[in-house]
Image (cartoon, rainbow, N blue to C red):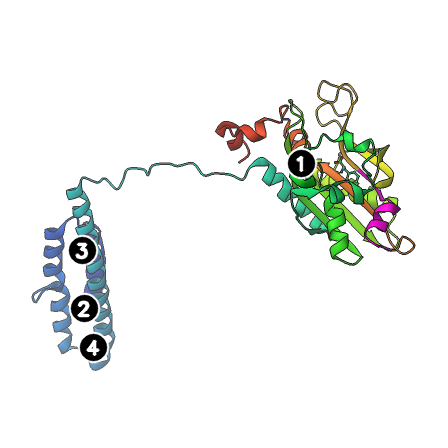
């Protein structure tokens, strides 16, 4: 039966196709099956004695086999040619490629990104502003007049003509409130500068400022936002506590601690036996600050907070020397992949 012969031929064709190694091999194969006296050609010719219906069916099958084979042979031929070219060039394409290392975001950038995510989920918008500031934005408008001892709390780098390097991101509170109308909810990450340097202090470091102004914003809202931030950053089980504190631009003011991530509150070297780690300062916006930006204190309330990015990152990853962030040793940076 001719249809059985076709089946047999198909099997034979594909088996032998797989065995083709080089160009002469390929040529022999082509002649054997597709040449003038080739097996497929021969079978096609022998269809002429069959019934019309069989001729159609088997003819179609054989023609398809022929076309498919011709296509595959062309591809195979190209593959063989490429391989031989590579051999001529002395290349071995089976060798593994040379490996290269992929860079990462700096750990501080990673943490800034995470914090922006967390506060975005609470509806805070991200704003940025200048690192070179005036005394007005950095101090005066924040209720720190020039006789105020708080000006000495932050050793300031002064530039010419009364300009200075901002000592905190709090001037962004003033800039944002002057630019926009309430209600508003912003965070402002960025670089700040203080004349200070040891294992815990760097003359340049990063802060993230937060500010929310609305009708009916309360101290409870502040505590809620800060607690959410702490749990998202350090883990859901993290306990927090609030201590009264003082900042000229907030009243009342607080500092927030988290339970020491190392000893879980028992007391260790990292937390100075306290069991708690201070992570930020905050408070309700002082009426004098609202006065400076002409916000009606009868209508609007707000809270503000400021946190140190290096400090958060050091606690999160157990880093004990702030200088690691700026020395750029590759082994340190690559551990944050
Ligand atoms: N600016 C303060 C600091 O750098 C932190 C702070 C910001 C406190 C906002 C209260 C409100 O220490």
In terms of secondary structure, where does tag 1 sit?
helix
State the separation of the CA atoms marked 1 and 3. 61 Å
The answer to whether the residues at label 1 and label 3 have Cβ atoms under 8 Å apart is no
The answer to whether the residues at label 4 and label 3 have Cβ atoms under 8 Å apart is no
In terms of secondary structure, where does tag 3 sit?
helix
From the image, state whether disc 2 or disc 3 is nearer to you.
Answer: 3
Give me the residue at 65% from left, 24% from top: 197
**Residue 184 included in the magenta stretch of the image:** no
From the image, state whether disc 4 or disc 2 is nearer to you.
Answer: 4
Quadrant into which the N terminus falls: bottom left
Name the spot of residue 320 as percent of width and height, x first: 64, 23
Task: Report the magenta residues as a range.
Answer: 282-295
List the residue tagged with mark 4.
55
State the separation of the CA atoms marked 2 and 1. 81 Å
Front residue of 209 and 288 = 288
Packing grade of label 4 (10 A; few <14, some 14-19, many >=20) is: some
- Left or right relative to 166: residue 241: right
Give me the residue at 34% from left, 36% from top: 98
N-terminal of the pair, mark 2 or mark 1, is 2
From the image, state whether disc 1 or disc 4 is nearer to you.
Answer: 1
Give me the residue at 22% from left, 61% from top: 10
Task: Look at the picture and state if 272 lies above or below 1.
Answer: above
The yes-or-no answer for disc 3 within 8 Å of ligand 1 is no
State the separation of the CA atoms marked 4 and 3. 32 Å
Task: Look at the picture and state if 59 lies above or below 127.
Answer: below
In terms of secondary structure, where does tag 4 sit?
helix
Residue found at the far left of this picture: 37
Identify the disc placed on residue 2.
2
Packing grade of label 3 (10 A; few <14, some 14-19, many >=20) is: some
N-terminal of the pair, mark 4 or mark 3, is 4
Identify the disc placed on residue 77.
3
State the separation of the CA atoms marked 4 and 2. 11 Å
């Amino acid at each position: 039966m001719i249809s059985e012969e076709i089946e047999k031929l198909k099997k034979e064709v594909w088996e032998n196709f797989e065995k083709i190694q080089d160009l002469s091999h390929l040529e022999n194969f082509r002649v054997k099956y597709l040449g003038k006296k080739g097996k497929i050609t021969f079978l096609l010719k022998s269809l002429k004695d069959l019934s019309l219906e069989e001729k159609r069916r088997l003819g179609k099958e054989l023609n398809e086999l022929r076309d498919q084979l011709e296509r595959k042979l062309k591809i195979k031929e190209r593959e063989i040619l490429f391989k031989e070219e590579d051999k001529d060039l002395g290349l071995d394409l089976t060798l593994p490629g040379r490996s290269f290392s992929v860079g990462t975001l700096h750990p501080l950038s990673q943490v800034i990104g995470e914090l922006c995510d967390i506060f975005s989920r609470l509806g805070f918008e991200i704003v940025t502003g200048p690192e070179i500031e005036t005394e007005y934005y950095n101090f005066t408008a924040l209720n720190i007049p020039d006789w105020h001892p708080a000006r000495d709390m932050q050793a300031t780098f002064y530039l010419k003509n009364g300009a200075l390097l901002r000592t905190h991101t709090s001037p962004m509170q003033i800039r944002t409130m002057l630019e926009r109308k309430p209600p508003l909810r912003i965070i402002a990450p960025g670089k700040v500068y203080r004349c200070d340097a040891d294992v815990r202090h760097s003359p340049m470091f990063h802060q993230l400022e937060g500010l929310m102004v609305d009708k009916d914003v309360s101290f409870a809202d502040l505590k809620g936002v800060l607690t959410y931030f702490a749990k998202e950053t350090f883990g859901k089980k993290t306990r927090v506590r609030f201590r009264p504190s003082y900042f000229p631009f907030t009243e009342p003011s607080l500092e927030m601690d988290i339970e020491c991530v190392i000893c879980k509150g028992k007391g260790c070297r990292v937390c100075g036996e306290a069991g708690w780690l201070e992570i930020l300062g905050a408070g309700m916006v002082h009426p004098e600050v609202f006065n400076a930006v002409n916000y009606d204190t009868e209508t609007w309330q707000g809270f503000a907070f400021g946190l140190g990015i290096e400090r958060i990152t050091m606690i999160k990853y157990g880093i004990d020397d702030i200088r690691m962030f700026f020395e750029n040793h590759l082994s340190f940076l690559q551990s944050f992949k």
